[in-house]
Amino acid sequence: MPAVHKILLDEALQDSPQTRSLLSVFEEDAGTLTDYTNQLLQSMQRVYGAQSEMALATEQLSTQLLEYQTQNFALGQGDVEVIGILQDFSKTVVELNALHSELATMLANGMVFPMVTFREKDLTEISTLKDIFSIASDEHEASMVKYSRLPKKRENDKLKAEVVAEVAYTRRKQHQASMQYYCSLNALQHRQRAAMLEPLLGYSQAQVNFFKKGADLVSKKMDSFLSRASSTTQSIQARLEWETEEMRATQRELLSVEDTVYTPDLDRDPPTARSYRGPATSTSAIKRA
Amino acid sequence: MPAVHKILLDEALQDSPQTRSLLSVFEEDAGTLTDYTNQLLQSMQRVYGAQSEMALATEQLSTQLLEYQTQNFALGQGDVEVIGILQDFSKTVVELNALHSELATMLANGMVFPMVTFREKDLTEISTLKDIFSIASDEHEASMVKYSRLPKKRENDKLKAEVVAEVAYTRRKQHQASMQYYCSLNALQHRQRAAMLEPLLGYSQAQVNFFKKGADLVSKKMDSFLSRASSTTQSIQARLEWETEEMRATQRELLSVEDTVYTPDLDRDPPTARSYRGPATSTSAIKRA
């Protein structure tokens, strides 16, 4: 705990130049703190924003995965294997999404909210009290002007009494206002320290909770998914390579024919060209040969 | 593994209407798959985008925290306690940020990239081969038209020979093109299944890695930070309450004075009003009284 500086309330009434200059030091610090608070709050809101976007994006992904089964693939219909994996995976993404949303909420409540409160409540209070103080000072000054213009002579007691009362009244008012202002500037020295730490506590608690639940989730769900999905992928790859090789062979074979296969039969009426049916007629001709 | 449908390459030469209608079924599925792939890719890119924004936001936060010590607080200078906590915390946020960046990279390489490749390579190949096939069909049709217009008579053998050769050439070309097109449509049946699973594997591996390292980090770093920072915060709060109470008491006491304290001394020259110095003069008057 560092030596915390203070403006002594006892100085409020005398309101000396020394007190005023100490006051200006406190005011400058409050200004610096306000600027820094705004920048820090901005960074925190950016983190929160990224997190809630992540929650939305994850949600969209899980929905998108489920829509695979609703695509009207005429051929892939029966693919229960891939569809099943996608469904399971989508479920896991939904659970992951729940964690992301929870993290976003915890960041909002534990990190952004305290920072906003500090700015809206404590820092605003300071500037309000500053205004009240300067108004009170002006009023007191005005009454002092009246007082200084009072005629020396012993007449006009009623008027004098009034002015004197006004001076007393405004002076008390200024005294109160300055003390309240001093109090909140002194308190700010402590509030500032707490205000810097509180959001970090919120941030940390949110992260700890997120990572612990997340590690638990992935070790339970995704590890098994990984082994299952990767084995399926491998078998698909193997099947693909085998099929590809087979098709390549068939293709080679089918293409290694004589040109006669492609040659129209000159002894017959020339086949009438009917778009793609052309080759068909010619092959039937070949068959008959 | 569902029964995977095929277009038989042997049908390519005959190119019958039955083959054509089966072909159109494969083509429709390829179209559906392309649309779905684009939507899924969009969701995946959104997840990636959110994650890299999170990495940037976390980085900004860690920098912002370090800047607290560079603020020229005239009063809070010696606050090594809070500054120390902020520095430690910033270090942890930097490590957290490294995990976020790593996750973003893994999502880009393991999830987005395979999906993009599938779209750019496999799906594009299909549409290219489709074009080549239809061009070859047109060329063959054109040559068949020439052939059908050949004069019956035995004259002009040279011309006939040329046309016949052209028919044979274009027919072989169409045969090759259609078989290649069939092959890639057949292969797509397998590639589609793999293409749906591969990005999910990448996503899962990235998440597993992220959460395991993250849980490790927070349990090592943040748990200790939490206890330290929260105890500091509590002591600050306690100190603040104590100070506040004390100031309130002083304030009450200082305000419970007679109005005389605020009343200018009528027997003296009226103090000249000089802005805030006003009260100062009057109090000095009181002191002498």
Image (cartoon, coloured by chain):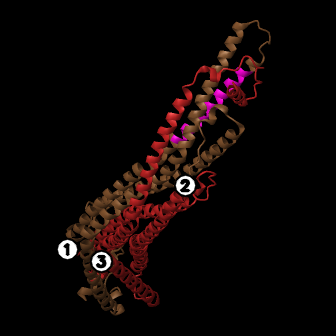
Chain colours: A red, B brown
Q: Residues within 10 Å of mark 1 (few under 14, many from 20)?
A: few
Residue B180 on image: x %, y %: 56, 34
Residue A248 on image: x %, y %: 50, 35
Mark closest to the chain's N terminus, 3 or 1: 1
Residue appearing at x 40%, y 83% in the figure: A173
Question: Of residues B106 and A226, which is closer to you in this image?
Answer: A226
For disc 1, the chain is A
Tag shown at residue B140: none
Residue A213 on image: x %, y %: 37, 71
Give the residue type at disc 1.
Pro
Residue occupied by mark 2:
B2
For marks 3 and 1, give the one nearer the viewer. Answer: 1
Residue occupied by mark 1:
A2
Give the residue type at disc 2.
Pro
Q: Quick check: A166 left or right of A191?
A: right
Residue occupied by mark 3:
A186
